Amino acid sequence: MKTHIFSLVFFLFSVAQGLNPKCETQDQGSNLQVFHIYSPCSLFKPSKPLSWEEDVLQTQAKDQARLQYLSSLVAKKSVVPIASGRQIVQSPTYIVRANIGTPPQTLLMAMDTSNDAAWIPCTGCLGCSSTVFDNAKSTTFQSLGCQAPQCNQVQNPSCDGSGNTCIFNMTYGGSTIAANLSQDTFTLANDSVSSYTFGCLQKTTGNSVPPQGLLGLGRGPLSLLSQTQDLYQSTFSYCLPNFRSANFSGSLRLGPVGQPVRIKYTPLLKNPRRPSLYFVNLIGIRVGNKVVDIPPSAIAFNPTTGAGTIIDSGTVFTRLVEPAYVAVRDEFRRRVKVANVTSLGGFDTCYTVPIVAPTITFMFTSMNVTLPQDNLLIHSTAGSITCLAMASAPDNVNSVLNVIANMQQQNHRILFDVPNSRLGVARELCT
């Protein structure tokens, strides 16, 4: 069995300006480039450079939308997020080049660990971007009928007039989509999967749909892990680099071979209301050497209400339910010992003078993860503003979900071992 290592290239839009990466480099072997959505190699970067403050505020708005969306998943309710005065694009943070069909057509698909089914814009889609998959040109494309077992694995399935095509409808962030359930060959680098089941988008509304589709890395029946069990054995890990690193490179490793041996594990929990999400049991948080006082109910895993903690690749800044966040924030401020605390958008703990921040430790069952300053603080380009890069979960929806986001995962190897129901974390310099 070979090791499937997908090289990732990450870029943070606020610091990547001026770099000249080799955007045209082709994927080789099992090495697949993955771009941050705002990298110079991305088609989705802002049309004009934003100030650091605008970068932060727009990222917060997208995180707010994603938190509302994730909360709606565990609550089994549809929520259309609202952010005053700002356009919301609730897309995951990273995109991957995928080749679909025969002959292959290339699309830049968003990766999302909190979703399952893949879906891509197809010819004739109403409301989709201008780049679509021309399914009529693929000799291996086929639509799935209503009798196909996969039709029972999608949300809100129905039949077309002839009964020959399974149609499904779902919400994603602030958008709705309608898709025909289909199959075709998916190729990532040189790894091809025949008869991969996905949604061929026919109509979208709203602005939350990733422009060229989505590749789900959750653990539901139509996710990449489930459809490639023989190839990758439902195991993968990634290492996200520090946004300020010089080359922004990290790695996504698929399959059990080559995964780290020296790594701590915590059990993966399953919520029957949303079994694809990667829940873990957060039992406490330590700031410096003090375990802060958090009501146990605020962080307890509760399948009935959807409460608990998930690991998510698409949210940038960690969000904690209000009692947990307030306890962490207050102890953080006490230890920093700087009286003048300011705010920036959703961040309420910012400083205009240099600070020495304490570590913050997430305490999970059988595993502690201690975060240094690089995982906790964001700094303005000129270094004049420093903020604690966490916030309280939205209070206008089902605010019972804690989300450990990708900034707090940087420079750690995060291993998803689904067959053994465990999640591993090891410190690693991803660059």
Image: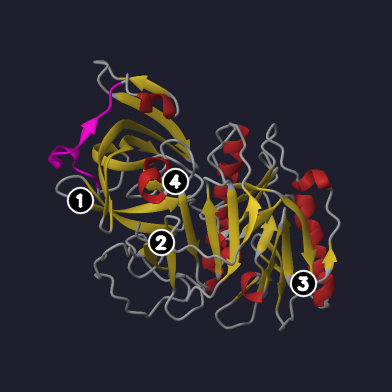
Q: Earlier in the sequence, mark 3 or mark 2?
A: 2
Q: Earlier in the sequence, mark 2 or mark 1?
A: 2
**Looking at the picture, does residue 238 appear above or below residue 104?**
below
- Viewed as shown, does residue 355 lie left or right of 227? right
Disc 1 from disc 4: Cα separation? 23 Å
Q: Nearer the viewer, mark 1 or mark 3?
A: 1
Q: Mark 2 near mark 1, Cβ–Cβ under 8 Å?
A: no
Name the residue: 80% across, 51% down: 323
Q: In the rendered structure, which segment of residues is drawn in magenta?
A: 132-145
Q: Which residue is mark 3?
A: 341
Residue 399 position in % (x across, y down): 69, 43
Q: Nearer the viewer, mark 3 or mark 4?
A: 4
User: Three-letter amino acid code at disc 1?
Assistant: Gln
Disc 2 from disc 1: Cα separation? 20 Å
Q: Nearer the viewer, mark 2 or mark 1?
A: 1
Q: Which residue is mark 2?
A: 37
Q: Residue 358, located in which quarter of the rendered image?
A: bottom right
Residue 122 position in % (x across, y down): 25, 40
| Label of residue 208 in the image | 4
Q: Earlier in the sequence, mark 1 or mark 3?
A: 1
Q: Which residue is mark 1?
A: 105
